[in-house]
Image: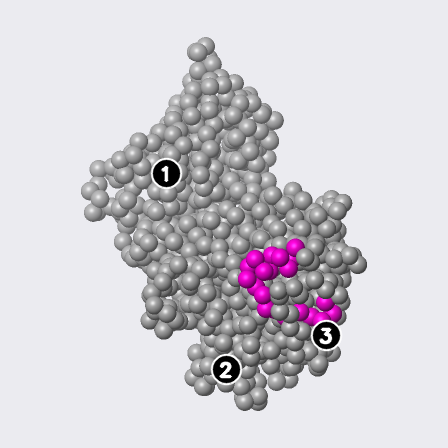
Amino acid sequence: MSTCLCDAFFDDVARATVEVLEQLGCTVEFPERQTCCGQPAFNAGDWPAARTVLRHAVDVFAGEAPVVIPSASCAAMLSHGAQILFENEPDVVAVKQLGTRAWELTDFIVRGLGVTSWPGRFAGRVAFHRSCHARGSGTGDAVSALLRSVSGLEFVDFDEAEQCCGFGGTFSVAFASISTAMGTLKLDNLLAAKPDVIVSTDMSCLLHLRGLAERQGRPLRALHVAQVLRDALASSEVGR
Amino acid sequence: MKREPIDQFAAEQSDERRTSVRLGSKAGHEKGTQVLHEDYADVDLLRRLAGQIKQHTLEHLDSYLEKAEEKLRTRGVKVHFALDAEAACQSVLDILQARGAKRLVKTKTMVSEEIELLPFLERHGVECFETDLGEFIVQLDADRPSHIVKPILHKNRREIARTFQQKGLGTYDDTPEVITRRAREFLRRKYLEADVGLSGANFVSAESGRLVLVTNEGNSRFCLAAPRCHIAVVGIEKLVPDDRSLSVFLNLLARSATGQRLSVYTEFICGARSPDAPDGPEEMHVIFLDNGRTEVLGTEYREILRCLRCGACLNVCPVYRQASGHAYRSVYPGPVGAVLSPLLAGKRFLELADLPKASTLCGACAEVCPVDIPIPDLLVRLRNRGKQEGAPSGATPSLGGFAKLASMPTAWKAALGMGKLVDHMPRAVQPGPLRAWQGERDLPAWRGGAFRSWFRKRGKKT
Amino acid sequence: MTDARDEIFARIRAALKPLEARTTLPTFDASVAIARHAQAMPDLVAAFTQALEAVHGRAFRDPTALATWLRAKEATLGYVDPEVLAALGPAFATELTLETSFSRARVEDYKFGITRDAGAIAESGTIILDDRSTPVRLAALAPWIHIAVVPRSRIHACIPDAISALGDDANIIWCTGPSKTADVEGILIEGVHGPGEQVALIVDG
């Protein structure tokens, strides 16, 4: 699943995801009819609309293959949110089945494929922004393990890591003032650690943080973890 | 683009206030987290245990409440039941009037705010004093508390000193020690003159009937030592099955609330004083309050009734830190309030239906809740309820159109292509949400369709 | 009144009726809630003293030292429960005025109150009071300094032990350090409505 954000703005992240999975020996399919996981409507409380979208996703991703997603929040929607959304629905079983096959990318790499260290090289100070929907999942530990194992990568800590970046879907516009304040605080904390790049599993967070940083005139290099993993691999191929 | 009310409130708040609330909350969160992890190898295990004990109690509330009532009656305590706020206030007044009591001192109890007890009693000629320092200051100021545990989180010492001066408690002095000393002296007289001491309860053990009061200042001890009558107003959800479970709850509560291992005073009360004791109430009353709790008990939101009122969720919440308690327009603010307040509002649910929207569903609250309440799940369920009951969408963009698009792949792909137009549209004519987004943030370049054509092309190569 | 009671119980039962699966009461070992530092405490007196001092309380083992401390603080007039006079010893009253009855009218005169206790908890540094041991509630509460006489044999190891030993007194108070508040800008102030000094005089027995 490429996610609607990557479909619209972040094609390189989706590309990197495919390349990383193929490097690990996976055959990657991209069902063309896919659209969105339904989370925006679910979070907004428009459950009938969310069900429509999710039913489409269940149809598109029917089968047994793991569905790998470069987004912890979309993965959480399929594995957790969807259970609540469909708890009284006749097709809850199909929805649950999809949920058991939905994986955030790094969680899939570490817990799904058993890969715990990453080859190649990625030089620089990396601040990992763990997205909120990764809470309670294997993603945080997975990213941490993979990134720390990359040669040349310096994993830096920063303050108030548990505080949300402030995106929150429609929250970002309906509560624009609070969203901006939260994002600005997050930027302050991230940048105080003087990272070379900020990495996340979620482009939603990075869309918001990068958007804010650019508007505020603060330089910020931000990458999705798939891009870091792909770039590290690429450097090993070139023999750097 | 419009703003949601809580966002509006946050934006209009003074920087000073925002900073007081944010840093105070942050300090509370950090201290609590530190002590919990210092003392316990598996904090989550304890939270889940406490959550299950509470859930079990709620799901068997009729039998536990009955047990507690019976125990208390055996100890000579007069037990009353109040259906709603009005009934509870009247119950309290009836007890006062039966004793010819005119002066009341009270400890900190959220329930008394919920039923608006003091204005009611004062209208009926009873002189009332809050004795918790923060609540006392709130009372002097005719203000409202902004946090469940730290009522004047939003005030600084200068504001307090000015209030004291205005209310005749001495010339302006903003030294915290002086402020505290003045409150001590003033309230001491009030305790000794009072006819009735009123409290809430943090827990009621069904096994022994004991009310457990958790405090730090000594005010609740004074309310139970000087006056001759004790009235406790307690929400029915405060029941715990037995004394033994209190070791779990007391350890979690103090650490989660203030980073202390135990609060300074933990009182276990199950009756009036013995007849020959010189101090203490000769008569004790407990008023068990419903006020919407039974309604919540019958819904899929019932887990919120586990709440211990520790305030940990407020402390960690990034939205609370920006907005402060008053933004929630109700007695219970923060994450717990965003769930509980609209629910307790009963028929007036829609008036507070915007509260559950004031969240990014980040889940930090659920991680710190000592009774493991899945607050984000409850918030999202309430958003669904709000929408179904026709709550105005306010400043929240409707996603019906997006959802339609997302169930029609051909239209979706077409939109990916057309989206490029956004890059060339002047902001003023862009759709509302995009315009609002760009109020404070840049939007990246549109790349719709780029990944798909890349994937398609490489497929053709092989 | 009975109507309200019946109505509330009826509402509770109606609310719970549709619930198919009910959460069972979990079984657990009481030790799960015991803090790490209290898992092993070979010397309860030492552990209690340490925990009491950690919450800014004070422990004395020698009544003479306690008396000296009181005089140094110019706390020379106080209330004493007559039953603890023996534990204090005859020399205690030197340069101190001890009154064995407590008068509400003179509540501000007493600079200290010395009372019996109903036990203590080593894990938390808690002094336990109840109506049986401290029926004059104000004596342990109003003066700036409260001193509880704590026989070593009554020190419980942990909170679960103290809870099992709660007994049937109608008014049990666990005092863990001096009264405090952080309501004003989060600044910790000790001595609010209750004592500003919480003292334990540990005695044999």
Residue stretch in magenta: C65-85
Q: Nearer the viewer, mark 2 or mark 1?
A: 2
In which chain is the residue bearing label 1? A
| Residue C44, above or below B121 | above
- Dot 3 corresponds to which residue? B71
Q: Nearer the viewer, mark 2 or mark 3?
A: 2
Q: Nearer the viewer, residue C71 or B436?
A: C71
Q: Position of residue A30 (x, y in %)?
A: 47, 31
Mark 2 vs mark 3: which is more N-terminal?
Answer: 3
Q: Is residue C55 magenta?
A: no
Label 1: state its secondary structure: helix
Label 3: state its secondary structure: helix
Type of amino acid under label 1:
Leu
Horizontally, residue A149 falls left or right of residue C91, namely left
- Dot 1 corresponds to which residue? A187
Type of amino acid under label 3:
Lys
Q: Share a chain, discs 2 and 1?
A: no
Q: CA distance from mark 2 to mark 1?
A: 53 Å
Horizontally, residue C76 falls left or right of residue B344, namely right
Q: Residue at x 60, y 81 (%)?
A: B228
